[in-house]
Image: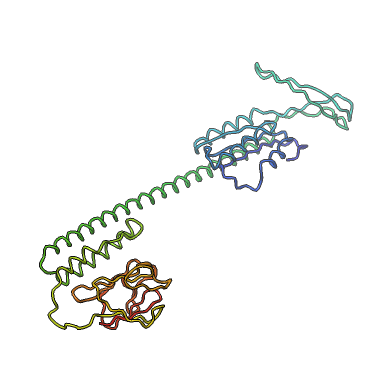
Amino acid sequence: MNANTSSRKILVILSDGNDNSELNREEIETLISDKSFSVFTIGTIAESSESKNMLINMESISSKAKDGFYYRIYEAEDMKNIIPAIYDRVKNEYILTYFSYAPVSTEVKANINIVSGKNIFQKDFSYKSPDKIIENAPSVSFWKTKEFLYGSIGAGIVLLGLAILLALNIKKKKQFKLEKEEEQRLRLLEAEENKAKFENFQVEYDDLLDRLENQQNVSESEKEKILQLEDILNETSKTAFGEPVKIDTRRRTMILEAKENIPEVHVSNTNPKIIIQSGPLNGQQIELNKNSIVVGRLEGDIVLSDDTISRTHAELTNINGKFYIRDNDSTNGTFINNRRVNHSLLSDGDVIRLGNVQLIFKN
């Protein structure tokens, strides 16, 4: 950008509103403020909260140039209109050459009047006459120079490239927006489907309890069905609501206790028990003399003060003389013989691990 050269120059600045350039506005304004060439600034997207400041900078830059123009476009089609406008604007500019009749090396104050149709333009200016007089200097029309031809071709290629980049950028942003909207739609649809599944299983669970309440006896398969449905409700509630729904098992326990039959074989004189093998209660034996026993860190029938135990970690349930263990969606899980379970039938000698606390089931 040498001010002393007579080569034809224009400057085109294109921005998409994202301020990620290493140049700042003040540097660009200083660079163009004393240059005699046209500056075209183009904002490629509509103003938004993120791009507003950058697009204001574009307008400010064009205002600092001696011959500056600011264009704002909202879609790729607008670039097709701006390219001819810039071309016509450059085409209608002229480089004036003149002969100076002043003495050599003299400061001269002058003015120029330009008549274009009905318009008259006046300009006062000053210059220093050359150190050497050049007579019969040829007058060459700018339109016949190689600079105009090459400059026009180069400007057209640059603007076409910018238009292509702009179109690709807009297409990419639209595609990204559509993908996000589709992802959100699928998530909402999945959530609705999971809610419907949960409601269906809840109805099936309630209907089963209603039916068992009116029966004389409850079979083992029906007991297993209850536990299976409670597990399904626990899992589907996580996907439907983001967290497990607390299932009220009191009605189930009351129904099963009411339908209990007296065991026909193997009447034991002692209740099963839990032997604690680690943790604060290491060595203690706890008799299981209730049909529902909750094990937890802060609440329950058996309180284990260990940080790896959840508040209400697990529940031991006596159903028709058989003990089952159910995990209450604990953080560190419930393990039977080193296998993680949600619910399981307990057998004599089973090793139970709740967090870091180990217990033995004795029947």
Taking the image as shown, residue 83 lies to the left or right of residue 355, namely right
Q: Quadrant of residue 295?
A: bottom left
Q: Is residue 332 above or below residue 351?
A: above
Give the position of the N terminus as an image quadrant.
Answer: top right
Q: Quadrant of residue 30?
A: top right
Q: Is residue 164 above or below residue 329?
A: above
Taking the image as shown, residue 79 lies to the left or right of residue 112, namely left
Where residue 108 appears, x then y in whole percent?
A: 85, 25
Q: Quadrant of residue 90?
A: top right
Q: Is residue 263 above or below residue 90?
A: below
Where residue 99 appears, x then y in whole percent?
A: 81, 26
Q: Residue furthest left?
A: 216
Q: Residue furthest top?
A: 118
Tell which of 37 and 232 is nearer to you: 232
Taking the image as shown, residue 201 lies to the left or right of residue 18, namely left
Tell which of 30 and 233 is nearer to you: 233
Tell which of 293 and 2 is nearer to you: 293
Identify the residue shown where x is 13% and y is 76%. Answer: 262
Q: Is residue 88 above or below residue 337?
A: above
Taking the image as shown, residue 360 lies to the left or right of residue 31, namely left
Where residue 130 appears, x then y in whole percent?
A: 86, 31
Give the position of the C terminus as an image quadrant.
Answer: bottom left
Where residue 184 appears, x then y in whole percent?
A: 38, 50
* Colour option used: rainbow
